Image (cartoon, rainbow, N blue to C red):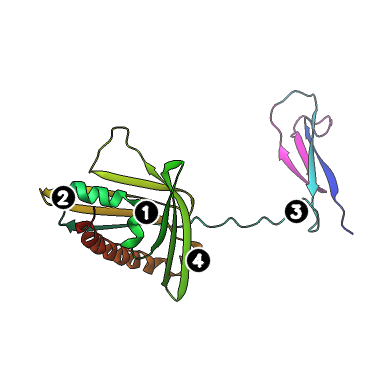
């Protein structure tokens, strides 16, 4: 059985002794936890001041002496950016990419996108892909962010609200009356499942996004 012992440390400030010798220096004594040390005193009045300093020693089994859990490490965020010139007018490319539920038809790792009927700015996404020797599956709820000043045919951007943390943007730049440049940027938190291969994840995903934009370029030509 363990117990908690409490000692009291007393600091005495004032003359240590009342000898008649004037050449003897006054000293103060500090005693704590059954140990004492003496130090030269300063020029104070002859009054004594006592301060009680509680000192508590804990046994190893004391409930106050607990082991703290280690905090989870901050997960790494990665960014991927790919570009592709598309041979369709910028308005067509923008409308095609804005059709979120059609994205699984050309993005290789997105399996489903469902727009919430009562909140069209929200959509539920699911990802399924086999990579790094694993069947990878994630899902998230995303919100399409609205610009304060609408900029049609220029930018689409989103961020996740729950599930796999991610955010991104698609920007459209005119190259002529019948072509445009599509730039896709995706930022995501590396899932703990894939942390051991984090260094290989970014170039792998960039390859998938590039393939997606290649398929998007073909898909957009027949988009109505």
Left or right, 116 with respect to 148, comes to: right
Quarter holding the N terminus? bottom right
Q: Earlier in the sequence, mark 1 or mark 3?
A: 3
Labels 4 & 3 near each other (Cβ < 8 A): no
Of all residues, the one furthest to the left in this rendering is 176
* Residue linked to disc 1: 101
Q: Please state which of the two labelled residues, at mark 2 or mark 3, is closer to the viewer.
A: 2
* Residue linked to disc 3: 65
What separation in Å lies between label 4 and label 3 (alpha carbons)? 34 Å
What separation in Å lies between label 2 and label 1 (alpha carbons)? 21 Å
Q: Secondary structure at mark 2?
A: loop
**Magenta-tinted stretch:** 17-43
Labels 2 & 1 near each other (Cβ < 8 A): no
Any mark on residue 193, and which?
Answer: 4
Report if residue 29 lies within the magenta region: yes
What separation in Å lies between label 2 and label 4 (alpha carbons)? 40 Å
Q: Please state which of the two labelled residues, at mark 1 or mark 4, is closer to the viewer.
A: 1
Q: Nearer the viewer, residue 107 or 105?
A: 105
Residue under the image location 47 percent in, 54 percent down? 140
Labels 1 & 3 near each other (Cβ < 8 A): no
* Residue linked to disc 2: 89
Q: Please state which of the two labelled residues, at mark 4 or mark 3, is closer to the viewer.
A: 4
């Amino acid at each position: 059985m363990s117990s908690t012992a409490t000692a009291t440390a007393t600091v005495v400030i004032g003359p240590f002794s009342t000898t008649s010798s004037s050449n003897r220096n006054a000293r103060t004594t500090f005693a704590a936890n059954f140990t004492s040390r003496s130090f030269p005193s300063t020029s104070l009045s002859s009054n004594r001041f006592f301060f009680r300093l509680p000192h508590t020693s804990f046994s190893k089994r004391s409930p106050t002496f607990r082991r703290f859990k280690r905090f989870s490490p901050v997960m790494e965020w990665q960014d991927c950016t790919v570009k592709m010139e598309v041979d369709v007018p910028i308005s067509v490319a923008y409308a095609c990419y804005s059709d979120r539920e059609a994205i699984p038809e050309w993005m290789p790792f997105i399996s489903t996108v469902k727009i919430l009927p009562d909140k069209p700015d929200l959509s539920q996404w699911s990802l399924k892909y086999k990579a790094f020797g694993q069947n990878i599956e994630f899902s998230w709820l995303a919100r399409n962010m609205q610009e304060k000043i609408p900029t049609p045919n220029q930018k689409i951007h989103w961020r996740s609200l729950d599930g796999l943390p991610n955010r991104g943007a698609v920007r459209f730049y005119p190259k002529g009356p019948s072509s445009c440049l599509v730039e896709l940027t995706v930022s995501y938190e590396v899932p703990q499942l894939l942390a051991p291969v984090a260094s290989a994840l970014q170039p792998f995903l960039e390859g998938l996004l590039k393939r997606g934009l290649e398929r998007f370029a073909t898909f957009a030509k027949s988009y109505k």
